[in-house]
Image: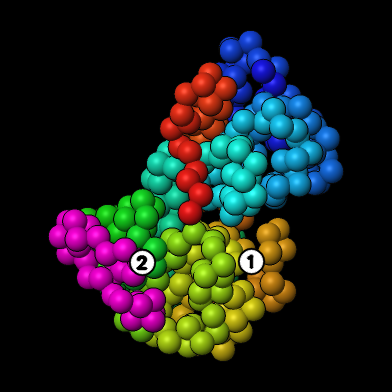
Amino acid sequence: MKVFVTRKIPNAGIDMLREKGWEVLISPHDRALTRDELIDMGRGADAVLTQLTDKIDGSVVDGWGSQLKIIANYAVGYDNLNVKEISDRGVLMSNTPDVLTETVAEHTFALMLSIARRIVESDKFSRAGKYKGWEPFLLLGNDVCYKTLGIIGLGRIGARVAHHAVRGFDMKVIYYDVRRNNEFESNFGATYKDTPDDILTEADFISIHVPLLPQTRHLISAERIKKMKPSAYLINTSRGPIVDEIALRDSLKKNIIKGAAIDVWENEPLLTPGLSDLENIIITPHTASATEETRQKMGEIAAKNIIETLEGRNPPNKIIPK
Ligand code: DGY
């Protein structure tokens, strides 16, 4: 069997594949591959381990050849895969759910605390030698405790963020999702809202956890940002295009909302001009799942999905086309 890995990942997953005695080709480039490079290097592979930066559609799969059995995405999100075109060609797909839930929820909370307590600004201020002694109004932020957290998208990560909010910070949780979750409501005293707008108008902190789909692109638009409280903070660790980044920049500039913290950008790796000049936003470079432990587990899961498929069994994290 031949497995193509589109970019180096932690060794554990690669070792699992090599231990099978299979040929494992890892891209020698430490960068995202171009479409032509992807096709050339993956030609003849039985399995391809892809990154979320690889855009895979039917024509890429055709280039890889009809022996291809599985595309194992090294991410929980899989908006980089054209699920319909790939499944129409009889190729399976898998992702890496569960192993990164804690890590992304932790990063979400880190962003929430950091923007509310002005941690990045305070760090810059201190390093710049600007601290001249305690002051009553120096770098005042806002409390997180007892506030209302609005979760938009109650998957595993959204639910874990709610757990930290309720158990750790006595926050009140309201949520919107296409499906209502009674068990979650009774576990966390959470309240379901019928529309995202109900979340935006009521919450002090809004955390986005929906997948990127045609219907969620620009879910957070200029009009929707205007519905938020002027004191509210927006946190996005899902996918960048869910938030209209130009609208976010303009709203932050005009103080229509208090602040934002984003791990995902609308046009990665390009950031909307002007956004990084603002003090009321914290920006991390799509690193919410970036811990040594989690990235290793993601590699192991991707390898496991490949192994199960190439040995004729069902991959545990198969993506089901809708
Ligand atoms: C994912 O797995 O979808 C994350 O965005 C990767 O960090």
Q: Would residue 21 appear left or right of 262 to someone viewing this image?
A: right
Foreground of the two, 62 or 215:
62
What amino acid is at disc 2?
A: Val
Quadrant of residue 128 in the image? Answer: bottom right
Circle 1: residue type: Glu
Residue ID at (70%, 58%): 269
Front position in the image: 46 or 117:
46
Within-10-Å neighbours for mark 2: few <14, some 14–19, many 20+: few
Tell me the CA gap for discs 2 and 1.
Answer: 23 Å
Region rendered in magenta:
174-200
Indicate left or right for 2 with 194 as reference. right
- Tag 2 residue: 178
Q: Which residue is mark 1?
A: 266
| SS for dot 1 | loop
Which percent across, then down, holds residue 28?
A: 79, 30
Residue at horizontal 51%, vertical 74%? 219
Q: Quadrant of residue 250?
A: bottom right
Position of 15 relative to 165 (above/below): above
Residue 120 seen: no
- Is 140 contained in the magenta span? no
Q: Quadrant of residue 8?
A: top right
Indicate left or right for 133 with 89 as reference.
left
